[in-house]
Image: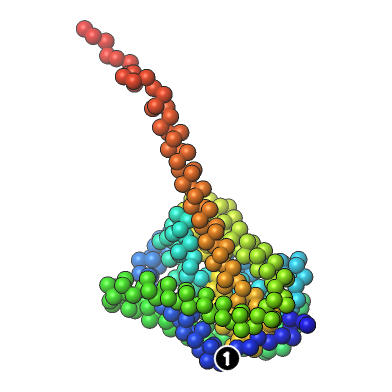
């Protein structure tokens, strides 16, 4: 069985539910975004420029090379490229907080990035997908309509995002109360939806689990590593590095899954990659964030102990400077 010829079973009503969940995710991000977040980016744009360059240019380019290196089938390659071209996921802020990173920067980057990706995603997917030696045939076969995809993305991302910004601006107290529920309900809904989609197509998933597991594992590791390396080379501090690591490494694979069914007819390799990415992304991100937080605590404790050591070694009552001569 060739995964490029497999189509996943997916009820039309389920696609509507997925779009609602994705819209709720964007609504939750907007409720946590203030105008000051955008102003902060304008005042200190270095971190944002690094994050955008890593996401827009480096991640798709490195993903393109990874698909050639792994020599995966066309639909799997296109699924990996699609995920790389998707905007960052909102769980990046949760992971940044858990790791001890710069949450304010994470919120700002996610807000700006999602606005940019409304227009950028169709262009990036068409360019990198069309350039691929095997996946390009799939892109041309579906006659990908960039304007239609732009409209679909705007309805899923743009409308709820701008609605959330408006509510946050006019009713900040209400937004503060609703935002935590919107964030976690949408996240749980997305995970549940992806899990249900995989279970409903379990035979297909198990038939290709080996190559998909390897591809997604390596792809996700590369994305996280690319975020960290970009921030480090850019000379950013540890807290900013953590924020950019998760901003680049965590992608909105749920949106990618929705686009697979909307524009590629539920093509097997693309759907399985996007679906598994949405689950593994969270597992890998939580693992990295937890280990990173523990490492930072140990490093801080060691630094504090090293600072305290000279004071502890000084004899009690010893003078810190020469005494003034007595008359």
Q: Position of residue 195 (x, y in %)?
A: 57, 77
Q: Residue at x 56, y 52 (%)?
A: 232
Q: Which residue is mark 1?
A: 11
x, y percentage for residue 88? 52, 70
Q: Quadrant of residue 166?
A: bottom left
Is residue 327 depicted above or below 312 in this figure? above
User: Going by the image, does 182 lie left or right of 203?
Assistant: left
Task: Tell me the quadrant of the picture where the C terminus can be found.
Answer: top left
Mark 1 surroundings: few (<14), some (14-19) or many (≥20) residues within 10 A:
few
> Residue 64: in sight, yes or no?
no
Residue at the limit of the structure toward the left, as seen here: 327
Q: Nearer the viewer, residue 297 or 47?
A: 297
- The answer to which image quadrant residue 41 occupies is bottom left
Q: Is residue 178 visible?
A: yes
Image x and y of residue 12, in percent: 56, 92
Q: Picture coordinates of residue 279 (x, y %)?
A: 57, 71
């Amino acid at each position: 069985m060739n995964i490029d010829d497999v189509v996943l079973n997916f009820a039309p009503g389920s696609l509507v539910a997925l779009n609602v969940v994705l819209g709720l995710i964007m609504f939750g991000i907007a409720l946590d975004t203030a105008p000051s977040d955008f102003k902060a980016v304008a005042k200190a744009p270095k971190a944002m420029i690094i994050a955008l360059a890593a996401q827009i240019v480096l991640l798709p380019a490195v993903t393109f090379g990874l698909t050639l290196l792994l020599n995966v089938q066309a639909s799997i390659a296109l699924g990996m490229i699609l995920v790389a071209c998707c905007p960052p996921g909102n769980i990046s802020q949760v992971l940044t907080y858990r790791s001890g990173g710069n949450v304010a920067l994470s919120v700002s980057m996610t807000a700006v990035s999602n606005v940019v990706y409304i227009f950028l995603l169709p262009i990036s997917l068409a360019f990198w997908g069309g350039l691929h030696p095997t996946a390009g045939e799939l892109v041309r076969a579906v006659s990908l309509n960039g304007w239609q995809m732009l409209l679909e993305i705007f309805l899923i991302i743009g409308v709820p995002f701008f609605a959330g910004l408006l509510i946050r601006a006019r009713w900040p107290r209400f937004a503060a109360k609703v935002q935590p529920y919107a964030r976690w309900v949408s996240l749980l809904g997305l995970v549940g939806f992806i899990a249900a989609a995989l279970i409903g197509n379990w035979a297909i998933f198990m038939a290709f689990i080996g190559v998909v597991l390897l591809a997604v594992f390596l792809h996700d590791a590369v994305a996280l590593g690319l975020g960290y390396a970009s921030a480090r080379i850019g000379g950013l501090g540890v807290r900013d590095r953590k924020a950019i690591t998760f901003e680049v490494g965590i992608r909105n694979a749920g949106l990618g899954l929705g686009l697979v069914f909307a524009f590629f007819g539920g093509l097997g390799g693309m759907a399985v990659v996007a679906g598994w990415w949405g689950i593994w992304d969270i597992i890998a991100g939580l693992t990295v964030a937890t280990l990173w937080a523990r490492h930072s605590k140990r490093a801080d404790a060691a630094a504090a102990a090293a600072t305290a050591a000279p004071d502890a070694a000084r004899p009690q009552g010893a003078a810190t400077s020469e005494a003034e001569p007595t008359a």
